[in-house]
Image (spheres, rainbow, N blue to C red):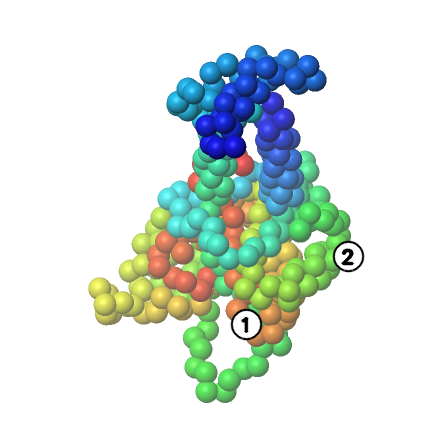
């Protein structure tokens, strides 16, 4: 009986860890859904996921590496610094941008601009890959 | 003491367990245990390995991985270009880089919403944009094309254009075979 209980506890720990990783990486939102899509499945490269948080159709903040930041200029700058630090630590990192389909472009564009500049500077001339997350079908 | 004597002593010990021995040992060990051939995986103390829970757990883990893998594959990615978005990159004087082809996206419903800032046929929708750009892409199958596949293309959506519409146009340009597509910096 004891090995069975051990395995059950191990499974519980495993499920908890996996669910936490998934929750911090991918915020639930309605991603754009282009049809027919030219998007590709994610590769094996290390990735940093920038989530644009949305509330009532407007931007509510940013989330990167499990940390939430405000929607103001200071929050965006904090995200950019966090992204730059992550790119310095892992120069081959891909940046994945996740934003709700209903957001206006004006809310997403600053992220592409500021975070992109910070990442390219941190990579010291090496190419930084930005990927736009889309949804083949349904919600995440 | 020869081997036969040792064997007889062992058999006698089995048949006459000591009063201190646990009752389970006496029950689990038949009197002729040493004489019977060992046909099962039971050990000398009556303990065996039941593989059924292990197999159950293994199948559970297998089902979990299958479900998780399906969830992860549901999200796909469009490749965007960041190379031109930083001002501190050193510029090579001999680098004859083509200026980006600019595509503007507007949100108004009455007028044309996609505009290629170039003397090209103007598309009516995203599918038409794919056709226009694909027909101008240079390649072995289209030697008369105007643009190489690595021609920089810059998308400039208006501020009130939805992210979904911007990504739809981005996807249309990517489907036309161009590899260096980026969003314009907000003005």
On the image, numbered disc 1 is attached to which residue?
A: A126
Q: Secondary structure at mark 1?
A: loop
Q: Nearer the viewer, residue A33 or B27?
A: B27
Q: Nearer the viewer, residue B107 or A45?
A: A45
Host chain of mark 1: A
Name which quarter of the figure residue B19 lies in: top right
Q: Nearer the viewer, mark 1 or mark 2?
A: 1
Q: Position of residue A132 (x, y in %)?
A: 52, 52
On the image, numbered disc 2 is attached to which residue?
A: A74
Q: Nearer the viewer, residue B110 or B54?
A: B54
Q: Position of residue B184 (x, y in %)?
A: 55, 62
Label 1 Cα neighbours within 10 Å, binned few <14 / some 14-19 / many ≥20: few
Q: Upstream in the sequence, badge 1 or badge 2?
A: 2
Q: Nearer the viewer, residue A82 or A12?
A: A12
In this rendering, position of residue A33 left or right of residue B121 = right
Name which quarter of the figure residue A9 lies in: top right
Host chain of mark 2: A
Tell me what residue is drawn at x 54 percent, y 82 percent.
Answer: B91
Q: Position of residue B4 (x, y in %)?
A: 46, 28
Tell me what residue is drawn at x 43 percent, y 75 percent.
Answer: B98
Tell me what residue is drawn at x 57 percent, y 47 percent.
Answer: A98
In this rendering, position of residue A50 left or right of residue B149 = right
Is residue B108 in view? no
Label 2 Cα neighbours within 10 Å, binned few <14 / some 14-19 / many ≥20: few
């Amino acid at each position: 009986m004891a090995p069975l209980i051990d395995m059950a506890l191990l499974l519980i720990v495993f499920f908890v860890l996996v669910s936490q990783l998934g929750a911090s990486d991918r915020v639930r939102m309605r991603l754009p859904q282009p049809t027919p899509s030219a998007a590709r499945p994610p590769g094996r490269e290390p990735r940093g996921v920038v989530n644009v948080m949305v509330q009532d159709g407007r931007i509510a903040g940013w989330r990167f590496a499990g940390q939430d930041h405000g929607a103001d200029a200071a929050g965006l700058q904090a995200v950019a610094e966090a992204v730059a630090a992550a790119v310095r630590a892992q120069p081959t990192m891909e940046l994945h941008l996740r934003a709700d389909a209903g957001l206006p472009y004006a809310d997403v564009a600053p992220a592409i601009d500021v975070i992109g500049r910070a990442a390219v500077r941190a990579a010291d001339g090496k190419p930084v890959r930005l990927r736009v997350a889309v949804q083949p079908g349904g919600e995440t | 003491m020869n081997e036969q004597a040792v064997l007889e002593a062992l058999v006698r010990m089995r048949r006459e367990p000591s009063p201190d021995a646990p009752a389970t040992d006496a029950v689990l060990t038949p009197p002729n245990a040493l004489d019977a051939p060992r046909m099962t995986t039971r050990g000398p103390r009556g303990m065996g390995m039941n593989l059924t829970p292990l197999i159950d757990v293994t199948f559970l883990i297998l089902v979990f991985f299958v479900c998780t893998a399906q969830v992860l594959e549901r999200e796909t990615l469009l490749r965007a270009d960041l190379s031109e978005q930083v001002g501190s990159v050193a510029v090579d004087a001999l680098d004859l880089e083509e200026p980006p082809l600019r595509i503007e996206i507007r949100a108004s419903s009455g007028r044309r919403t996609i505009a290629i800032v170039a003397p090209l046929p103007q598309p009516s929708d995203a599918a038409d944009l794919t056709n226009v750009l694909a027909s101008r892409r240079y390649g072995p199958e289209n030697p008369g094309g105007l643009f190489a596949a690595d021609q920089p293309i810059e998308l400039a959506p208006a501020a009130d254009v939805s992210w979904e519409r911007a990504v739809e146009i981005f996807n249309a340009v990517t489907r036309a075979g161009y590899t260096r597509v980026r969003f314009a910096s907000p003005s």
